[in-house]
Amino acid sequence: MAKQEDKFKKVLSHAKEYGYVFQSSEIYDGLSAVYDYAQNGVELKKNIRDYWWKAMVQMHENIVGIDASILMHPTTWKASGHVDAFNDPLIDNKDSKKRYRADVLIEDYCAKIESKIEKEVKKAAKRFGDAFNKEEFLATNGRVLGYQEKINSILSRMGKSLENEDLADVKALIEELQIADPLTGSRNWTEVKQFNLMFGTKLGASADTAMDLYLRPETAQGIFVNFLNVQKTGRMKIPFGIAQTGKAFRNEIVARQFIFRMREFEQMEMQFFVKPGTQKEWYKKWKETRLQWHLSLGMGAENYRFHDHEKLAHYADAAADIEFKFPFGFKELEGIHSRTDFDLKAHEKFSGKKLQYFDHEENKNYVPYVVETSIGLDRMFLAVFSHSLQEEELENGTTRTVLKLPSVLAPVKAAILPLVKKDGLPEVARKILDDLKWDFNVAYDEKDAVGRRYRRQDANGTPFCITVDHDTLQDNTVTIRHRDTMKQQRVKISDLKEIIAKEVTVKNWLQKM
Ligand code: GAP
C-alpha cells in the first residue's frame, strides 16, 4: 500500500513539475477537485481526445459528432431522472466532521481485501516459479477463495441495499465491517443520506424572473435531445451513432485522487441507436470494441478488466465498466451501458414531441434502443500518465525518470538539440525544427549538456531527441535517440520525417485494433 501511495505521490509531483496539471487557482490555495491543464497537459489531453474521435467518429461511416451546449433546458434533467435520482449516499463522521461517500468507504474496504489476494498471488508466484499458473491458483486456493467470497457478499449486499434505498442497511454494513474514518480512525458515524450531485445556476438578470438551470452532469442528454435533428439532417439509418466530447460537472462528495474524480471534467461519449431487440448484441460488440481501443495503446492487457454491474442504473438493462489498474488499484475508466429506450421515451413524454425513427425495412415507427460508451477524458489522462511514469535502473547504476507515453499521445514528438550553442549548429537545428513543425509538435532545447537535455526530454515523455553536431555541417546527418531504448542512430536529415511519422501517426496505432 505504501508503495502504491508513493507511486501516486510521484505522479502528482511529476505532473506539476513537467507542466502537465496544476491545481486550479493555486495562488488562492486552490479549489478542491478542480484542476487546470498546463502546457504539456493540454497537448496530451488533445491527443487522447483526437485518438478517440478518430476511432469513434471518423473511422465509422454511421457515427457522426456534435457539440451540444453545457446549459440545457431544465426539463431535460427532470426527464433524464437526474433531478430525482442523481444522488450519492453520504455519511459524516461525527468526530472528524469529514464527509464520505458510504459506498466508497465500503468499496475501499473491499479493495484492501483484494490487495491481500494480490499478496497471496505474489507469494505463490515466487514459491512456484515458472510452474505458477495464476488462473488455477485464483480458482483453487482456499484463502483466496475465502477473500473473494467475502468481497462478493459485501458488494452484493451493498448493491441490493442501495437499489432498495435501504440506507439504514448501508450504515449497518459499515458498522458491521468496523469501517473507520480513514483520516482519524473514528467509528462515530451519522446516518446515511442521499445528496444530489448537480450544480445549480441561474439564467437571466433579475432575481424574480431568473430561471433555475443545472450545469450538465453528463454530455449524453445533449445527444438525446438532438437525436431527431441529427437523424433527419444527416439522413442517418439505424444502427447509427452520435458522439461528442465536452465538459460535465458533478458536485462530488468525495473528490480526491487527483484528476480521477473531479467536480469539473470532460467526457467522451457515444450513443449508438439500434433496433429494439438488438441491443444485447450491440452491447457485446461495443464492450469488445472499446477494450480493443484501449489495448491498441499498448499499456498491457493485464491492466484492464471488465466489471459487469449487478446494480443497474434506472435507465439500463445491462452495464459494465472497463477498469484500469491505477496506482491506487483497479478502478472504473469507462462505462458501457445498454440504456434501453428510457431516455428518448422520457424526452417524448416531457417535451410532447415524437422522437421516433421510421424503419423503411420494417415499415413502422419505433423509439430506438441505445447502447452508450462513456469515458472520462481526465481519467484516461490519469491512466496514461500514471502508467507511463517509470523509474529505470540503468546499467551504470544510475536511475532515470522516464515518461513512456504511447508516442502517438506524447505532447512533443521530437526535441531538436544543437550539441553546442555556437559554430552554426543552432541555425541548422532551427532549420530542422521549422521544417518538422508543419507535421509534428516539436521543441527546441539548447540549454545544459546534451546528457541532461536527454534526461529532461525523457521525463517530459518526448519519444525522440535529434542532435545536431559538427558532422551534420559536413554530411547532413543527425543523431536520433529513442526515448524508450535510449538507442542512438545516425540518419539523414531528409529521412527524419518518415522515421518520426512511422512511430507517431494515429493510423499506425489504431490499425492494431
Ligand atoms: N452518460 C453516462 C455517464 O455519465 P458515468 O459512469 O457516470 O456515466 C462515465 O460516467 C465516465 O465519466 C466514467 O467512467 C468516468 O471515466 C468519467 N467520470 C464520471 N465522473 C467523473 C468525475 N467526477 N471526474 C472525472 N471523471 C468522471
Image (cartoon, helix red, strand yellow):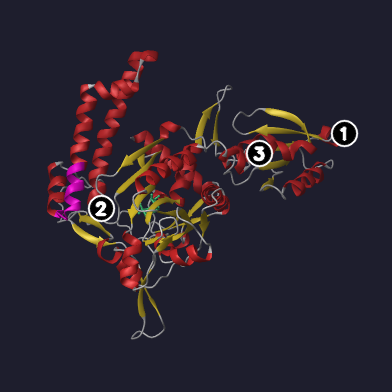
- Label 1 crowd (10 A; few <14 / some 14-19 / many >=20): few
Instruction: State the image coordinates of residue 138 (x, y, percent, origin top left).
Output: 28, 25
Q: CB atoms at circles 3 and 1 under 8 Å apart?
A: no
Tell me if residue 413 comes above or below residue 125 in the rendering.
Answer: below
Q: Residue at x 21, y 37 (%)?
A: 152
From the image, give the main secondary structure of the stretch colored magenta: helix
Determine whether the residue tagged by mark 3 lies in a helix, strand or loop.
helix
Q: Which label number is shown at residue 377? A: none
| Residue 115 seen in the figure | yes
Instruction: State the image coordinates of residue 141 (x, y, percent, origin top left).
Output: 24, 21
| Residue 449 seen in the figure | no
Which residue is identified by label 2?
101
Determine whether the residue tagged by mark 2 lies in a helix, strand or loop.
strand
Instruction: State the image coordinates of residue 417 (x, y, percent, origin top left).
Output: 72, 40
- Label 2 crowd (10 A; few <14 / some 14-19 / many >=20): many
Taking 395 as reference, is 344 left or right?
Answer: left
Residue at the extreme right: 474
Which residue is identified by label 3?
453
Q: Inspect the image, locate mark 3, and give the three-letter code of the amino acid beneath it.
A: Arg
Which residue is identified by label 1?
474
Instruction: State the image coordinates of residue 200 (x, y, percent, origin top left).
Output: 34, 70
Which stretch appears magenta? 156-167
Taking 170 as reference, is 237 left or right?
Answer: right
Question: Spatial distance from mark 2 to mark 3, Cα to Cα?
Answer: 45 Å
Tell me if residue 462 comes above or below residue 490 in the rendering.
Answer: below
Q: Nearer the viewer, mark 3 or mark 1?
A: 1
Q: Is residue 207 magenta?
A: no
Q: Is mark 2 within 8 Å of ligand 1?
A: no
Q: Earlier in the sequence, mark 2 or mark 1?
A: 2
